[in-house]
Amino acid sequence: MTRALRPDLAVIARHVAPGSRVLDVGCGDGALMAALRDESQVDARGLEIDPVNVATAVARGLSVVQGDADVDLADYPDASFDYAILSQTLQTTRHPDRVLEHLLRIGRHAFVSFPNFAHWRVRASLLFGGRMPVTRLLPVAWYATPNIHHVTIDDFRALLRERGIAVEGSWYLSNGRTARPGAANLLAEHAVFLLRG
């Protein structure tokens, strides 16, 4: 089933220890949670802002509540999960630095994945077209996008250094395949980080 997952979710699924307790923040329709439950016997819980996605996840038999990462993560107790996961959601939060702090407080480890706004196609669109890009992976016009913080891999690495957050693993993806770490800020469309506070 992990083959059917979005590439960043497949990376996360391969690296979550079987039998773990997981909180998936911004879990969408619960695809990752279902894969973790079915393939690795993970006790997965979810937090999702979209009521349609919550209903879909609950219909899959998943434990998902409707909530906002910017507000509701403060209510979770310290170290209550082995992993806190935030996939393709960081850039949509109002306070991504605070959300990251909560993830690392709630989980012993945290997975964070996000689209890289420094990818060469995004840069080329701005340079040659002079407009905010609409690409295969960023398919929505600037006025309708949920992305309010345009983060790059180098921006995220700098934040981690500033906050003293340890990186246990990182994966950079382009066209669903792994890209080299050295050129990731230019060549990777997505990044996945495994962190420890």
Image (tube, rainbow, N blue to C red):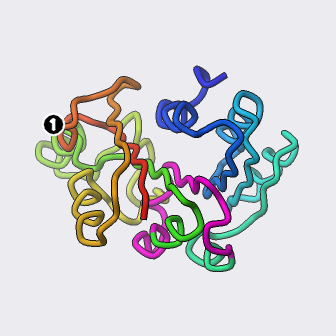
Q: Name the residue under label 1.
A: 183
Residue at left 32%, top 37%?
189
Query: Where does the image place residue 75, in percent across and percent down from the top left?
Result: 68, 79
Q: Which of 167 and 179 is in front in this view?
A: 167
Outermost residue, left side: 127
Is 42 positioned to the left or the right of 99 in the image? right
Residue 124 placement: quadrant: top left
Query: Where does the image place residue 162, in percent across and percent down from the top left?
Result: 24, 71
For the record, the magenta segment spans 76-100
- Alpha-carbon neighbours of circle 1 within 10 Å: few (<14), some, or many (≥20)? few
Look at label 1 and name its amino acid.
Ala
Q: In which quarter of the image is the C terminus?
A: bottom left
Q: Nearer the viewer, residue 143 or 1?
A: 1
Query: Where does the image place residue 137, in percent across and percent down from the top left?
Result: 41, 38
Question: Across the whole image, how many numbered discs are drawn on residues?
Answer: 1
Q: In which quarter of the image is the N terminus?
A: top right
Is 49 positioned to the left or the right of 159 in the image? right
Query: Where does the image place residue 134, in percent across and percent down from the top left?
Result: 35, 43
Residue at left 75%, top 64%?
66
